[in-house]
Image: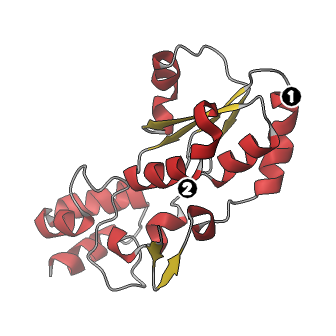
Amino acid sequence: RGLRTGKHMTNSTADLHRPVMLQRCLELLRPAIQGENAIVVDCTLGMGGHTEALLSENENLTVIGIDRDPQALELATERLAGFGKRFIPVAGSYDQLAEILDGLSISEVQGILMDLGVSSLQLDEASRGFSYAQDAPLDMRMNQSLGVSAANLLATSSEQELTRIFKEYGEERYAPLVAKQIIA
């Protein structure tokens, strides 16, 4: 099935995304995953580009792919279906790594990969509301079924609360001025 991204229609998840520093990541992980039954955790699965390359290169490898974005998890699972049980998708966040591994009865892994930051899936899809370069409702949630949208937060927070948020999470030195302008 085709996937809509921005103004373009594409036929596969692989067309949507090119993994960041793919060859360097593979090079750095290779020495650790040479043995039988190796396990790598992709803590920020996204659309599965890194995981696809790892599984393609290593026939004895299993990858646990973690993502908190249900859309990304669905797209990656579809992309990686051909690897069968060698790919284990998990809804969650990298800060839950210990609990996830405990839940899977895994006490040791050979590699961990984290591609930290906002993914192109969030930035490129106008409906996700991350980009101010596209006309869309301001949402900015990694998982749109949890919490409140950025638009709702801005509409319901006091000037003091917005100032605190901008200072604490955005390290914005003009937080009071920005908050005052939003309230105005």
Q: Amino acid at mark 1?
A: Gln
Pick the residue in front: 184 or 124: 124
- Can you tell which quarter of the image residue 16 is in? bottom right
Q: Residue at x 61, y 66 (%)?
A: 17
Residue at numbered disc 2: 47
Q: Amino acid at mark 2?
A: Met
Pick the residue in front: 128 or 156: 128
Q: Residue at x 15, y 82 (%)?
A: 184
Is disc 2 surrounded by few (<14), some (14 to 19) or many (20+) residues within 10 Å?
many
Where is residue 61? Give x, y as percent: 73, 31
Where is residue 181? Give x, y as percent: 23, 80
Indicate the secondary structure of the residue bearing disc 1: loop
Residue 37 lies left or right of residue 108; in this view the side is right
Residue at numbered disc 1: 34
Whole-number angstrom distance, CA of label 2 to CA of label 1: 25 Å
Q: Residue at x 17, y 65 (%)?
A: 152
Question: Which of marks 1 and 2 precedes in the sequence?
Answer: 1
